[in-house]
Image: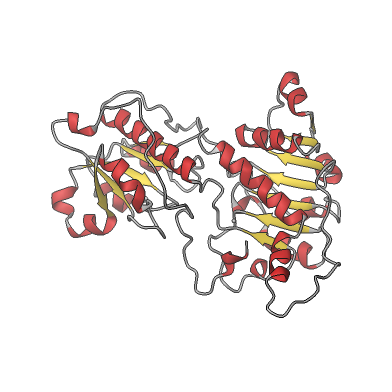
Amino acid sequence: RRSIARGVDSHVALPNCTTFPSAQLGRSLRRTPRAETETAETMSERACVLVSALSETQGVPRRCADVIREHFDVVTMEEFLKNKEQLENKIKVMFMWEFYPVVDEKLLRSLPALKVIVNNGVGVDHYDLPLIFSFGVKVANTPSVVDAATADMGMTLLMASARNVLEGHRIATLPNITVFPINVNGVEVTGATLGIIGMGRIGYKVAQRARGFDMKILYHNRNRRSEEEEKMVGARYCVKIVDLLQESDFVMVVVNLTPQTRKLIGEKELCQMKPSATLINISRGAVIDQDALVQVLQKRRIRAAALDVTDPEPLPRDHPLLHLPNVTLTPHFGTATDQTTLKMVDIMIENALAAIHGRPVPNEVLLS
């Protein structure tokens, strides 16, 4: 496929949590100027874009709606289901936000005018691409724009886990504490070895950030980077993933979810890691065998795990990962910054406009 890559704190264990907020963003979201001024209104009839909802908890963030409405009429799934006959031939675009709306054959048959589905991120493993393409519908995503924020999140998780930030917060806010304990030491990040599994755009940005901590960088990837790129971040290529696992103090997973990478990190790989090592995952939850991960964490076969992604999301509230002291969890918000969200919306609009006007779609996803 083209344009497929990728390229979440204790509040993940909120009771009765069934969905994650679509973005934990500030309230001062502002529209950035666009060079592209064309709108869907130049068509004979203003086109509609279908979204799951306009909400701060699920669907497109409500405060992004005005930006989208500059180009399209926005229709929620609830509105569509109530007015199918009036809307089915007007909806030409679908904006997928945090895996919703769910695209299946029934929905596709009910949208005869649909031209493109645009994803608010890079990963498209949640789509049945052959099914969508059989209806003559294009798929687009938003690569590159998510890279920096996701790499930042990877380093955030690494640092938080290494220095026991969540436990430190818990101790610092205890109601009756009078003396801070001295037995909550973390592990050093500066000078440690970071192994990056998946050295695409995001993985490389992680390496750039880790370089600032004087970390030794190993990487495993389908294709080796150029010698110049390796030198720029001081990275060493590991042909075999086992070599990376055995040498790394921190292992960060930054791969796409494909049939080949599902459960890429299983019991064997986890047991090849150092007992003092930490596993960080900013890709997809299914890349790791979670049952095996629970076992090695419970037995302290590795030091810790820091996960922005799980399978499923959210985890059942009684899942062991939510209650292990050596796990740091965040709710899949690697791209959730004000700036990245607005950039994603702009790119989604650009792709949608291209599709409905019959132009090449800049970030079209294709089957290889």
Residue 327 location, quadrant: bottom right
Taking the image as shown, residue 302 lies to the left or right of residue 38, namely right
Instruction: Looking at the picture, tell me which residue is in the foreground, 132 or 310.
Output: 310
> Relative to residue 211, is residue 115 drawn left or right?
left
The residue depicted at 42 percent of the width and 41 percent of the height is 342
> Where in the figure is residue 321, as x and y percent of width and height?
66, 66
Choose between 110 and 150: the one closer to the eye. Answer: 150
State whether residue 271 appears in this view.
yes
Q: Residue furthest front?
A: 178
Q: Is residue 249 left or right of residue 154?
A: right
Residue 168 location (% of width, % of height): 73, 64
Give the residue drawn at x 67%, y 52%.
157
Q: Residue at x 46, y 63 (%)?
A: 19
**Residue 214, image x, y percentages:** 81, 36
Disc count in the image? 0
* 315 is higher (above) or lower (below) than 136: below
Name the residue at 79% across, 36% down.
218
Above-or-below relation of 348 to 189: above
Closest to the observer: 314 or 23?
23
